[in-house]
Amino acid sequence: MGALTPDFRFGNFVGSIVWLVFVVLALVTLLILPIIFFVLFYVPMPVVDGEVLTPYLFFSMMVDPSRTLPVVQFFIHTDIFRAAVFPGFGFAALIAAATIFVERKLLAKMQLRVGPLYAGKVEGIFQLLADGLKLLTKEIIVPSGADKPIFWLAPIMFVSTAAAVVALIPVADGWVVADVSVGLIAAFAILGFFPLIALLFSWASNSKYPFIGGLRALHQMIAFEIPFFLSALPVVILSSSLNLTEIARSQSVFWNIFVLPINAFVFFISSLAELERIPFDLPEAESEIVAGWLTETTGMLYGLIQLGSYLKLYALAGLFVVLFLGGWSGPQIFPPELIAGAHDSNLPLLQMLALDGLYNPVTVNGIFWFLIKTIIVILLMLIIRGINPRIRIDILLHTGWYKLIVLTFINLFVVLMLIYGGVIGPGGMISIR
């Protein structure tokens, strides 16, 4: 074994670092900078502080701290920034990556195993990066009898569908990618595509184990979609709106989970089934059907599906927070100004440190509480995987078709009694506004 192991030489290590730096500089010089110049010279620029932003003015603002913040403030309120960075795809992908790492470490500690450890000195933090690079560089193997266009397209559809759900989740008042009037219906409609994509991909794989997993995903969807929808119906009745932002605003006095604990429980359980997580991971079921509908995935096709799964996990946790935990509501803990006197100061550096004109304490406070609640819900979903076994498919179908539907109707009737009894509602003793 000693002869097969290559000798570690410090010179080779330094050479690899220098080569990596050279490659990065070459990419920046030959690709990134030309794209920036193209955008600056050929794309119409916005008006900032009463001036049309020319390429030369843009570069002067980049080196002048007093004029940088207005440019940044303008761009963070553009639709492109919201969709690509925050609160859209980039923000959700960052949470998904952190969730993957936390899940692996958490389950390893719960089950007395060794989690990610060998890449990086701090709890194996770089193992996640190493796994991502591995997926990017591995060969993608397409089965010989597969329907190749669908086989390639399905993982992209999976990620795109997850990103579409993320776009509907408000993280603070006014901070949402797509604030549609029927946001709740749109979210449920988009979520209904996931099992269909799984079935389509499993059929395109032309393999028996993926197809069995796809059929299980379809059965699971049919069994849990009805209680999933019904669990959110009382929320709509209480808030008198299908808009997710309005639903979150309607919980300024009390959270819906205090009035709808059964519906919150049903929504949480149905979310686990929608995510195909233990104990409802029958569409994958490694010990029964290899990896279910993911059996034939390799390389970045598997990586895309995993990314879509964790984007979906964040979206459903955020949806639970908006529907039952008051969304971004919480006590104000952030100060009105980061640095006292920065607003009246003429020092550009002090204004930048205080984010003068950019920092909004109410928005930051809302984002903070939304993140705290969402992280707690995600952790509950992760812990369940570590303490529960997989259930049989007959128990799964019986749970969805009988038990959860009955529970949702019970809580629905209780809410209607409280509304018509004058206890809660717009004209009740306890106002929801």
Image (tube, rainbow, N blue to C red):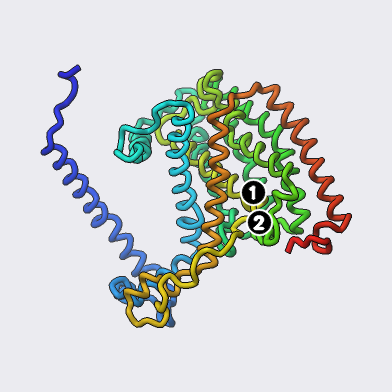
Q: Estimate the spatial distance between the alpha carbons at disc 1 and disc 2, rounded to whole Å.
A: 10 Å
Considering every residue shown, the one lying at the far right of the view is: 421
Question: What residue sits 81% from the left and 49% below the top?
Answer: 415
- Residue 402 falls in image quadrant: top right
- Is the residue marked by circle 1 packed among few (<14), some (14-19), or many (20+) residues within 10 Å? many
- Residue 15 falls in image quadrant: top left
x%, y% of residue 130?
33, 37
- Is the residue marked by circle 2 packed among few (<14), some (14-19), or many (20+) residues within 10 Å? many
x%, y% of residue 47?
44, 77
Question: What residue sits 32% from the left and 74% below the top?
Answer: 349
- Mark identifier at residue 244: 2
x%, y% of residue 77?
49, 67
* Quarter of the image that includes the N terminus: top left
Can you tell which of label 1 and label 2 is closer to the viewer?
Answer: 2
Residue at mark 1 = 187
Left or right placement of residue 192 versus residue 300 in this view: right
Numbered marks: total: 2
* Quarter of the image that includes the C terminus: bottom right
- Residue 426 falls in image quadrant: bottom right
Image vertical order of residue 216 relative to residue 150, above or below: above
Q: Answer yes or no: do the residues labelled 1 and 2 have beta carbons within 8 Å?
A: yes
Asked which secondary structure carries label 2, the reply is helix
Kind of residue indicated by mark 1: Ala
Question: What residue sits 40% from the left and 81% below the top?
Answer: 51
Q: Nearer the viewer, residue 296 or 227?
A: 227
Kind of residue indicated by mark 2: Leu
Q: Nearer the viewer, residue 319 or 417?
A: 417
Image vertical order of residue 41 relative to residue 161, above or below: below
Left or right placement of residue 398 versus residue 30 in this view: right
Image vertical order of residue 256 relative to residue 143, above or below: below
Left or right placement of residue 205 versus residue 33 in this view: right
